[in-house]
Amino acid sequence: QVQLVESGGGLVQAGGSLRLSCAASGRTFSSYAMGWFRQAPGKEREFVAAISWNGGSTYYADSVKGRFTISREHAKNTVYLQMNSLKPEDTAVYSCALGGRRATTISDEYDYWGQGTQVTVSS
């Protein structure tokens, strides 16, 4: 019933910016916390950022804090990840996830996942 579709990925030079979007469809979108995760080739999936069901609380991995910003627009059923000062180590497939009301850094606690969008940062 719930569908998540990411967009906005691509190739960008180090130091540049990129904005990812995740469009959600289904019942009671605004009542769910959402998060962003990423997975680089040969590595485990890691937490990037999360936002609570009402947008009141946000959480970030130490590696992206100060550079990335997560936000959501309830009216558009969309969550965003603004990525600034990108580094080559940010290269990964970025996936949007939807869970319960409480934001969490644990991937297993999310119920729905998008297909992912590729972000490649060149130097």
Image: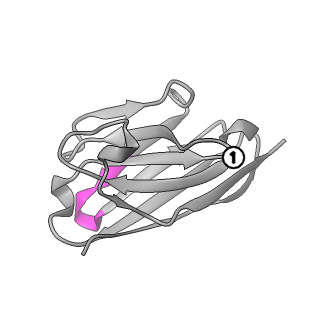
Does residue 87 appear in the picture of this structure? Answer: no
Residue lying at 30% horizontally and 45% vertically, measured from the top left: 109
What is the total number of numbered labels drawn onto the structure image?
1
77 relative to 114 in the view: left or right: left
Residue 110 at what x, y percent from top left?
A: 31, 50
Residue 60: image location, x then y, percent: 43, 31
Q: Quadrant of the N terminus?
A: bottom left
Which residue corresponds to mark 1?
91
Locate residue 114, reporting x and y percent.
44, 64
Q: Is residue 11 above or below residue 60?
A: below
Around disc 1, counting alpha carbons within 10 Å, would you say few (fewer than 14), some (14 to 19), or many (20 or more)? many
Tell me residue 51's x, y (percent): 31, 42
Which residue lies most toward the bottom here?
A: 1
Camera-nearest residue between 47 and 53:
47
Quick check: 78 above or below 43? below
Classify mark 1: helix, strand or loop. Answer: loop
* 62 is higher (above) or lower (below) than 22: above
Magenta region, residue range: 71-77
Dividing the picture into quadrants, the one containing residue 83 is top right
Q: Which residue is at a point 43% across and 55% down the rendered structure image? A: 96
> 26 left or right of 69?
left
Query: In this view of the protein, which residue sits in the foreground, 41 or 27?
Result: 41
Asked if the magenta segment contains residue 90, the reply would be no
Of all residues, the one furthest to the top in this rendering is 62
Q: Is residue 55 visible?
A: yes
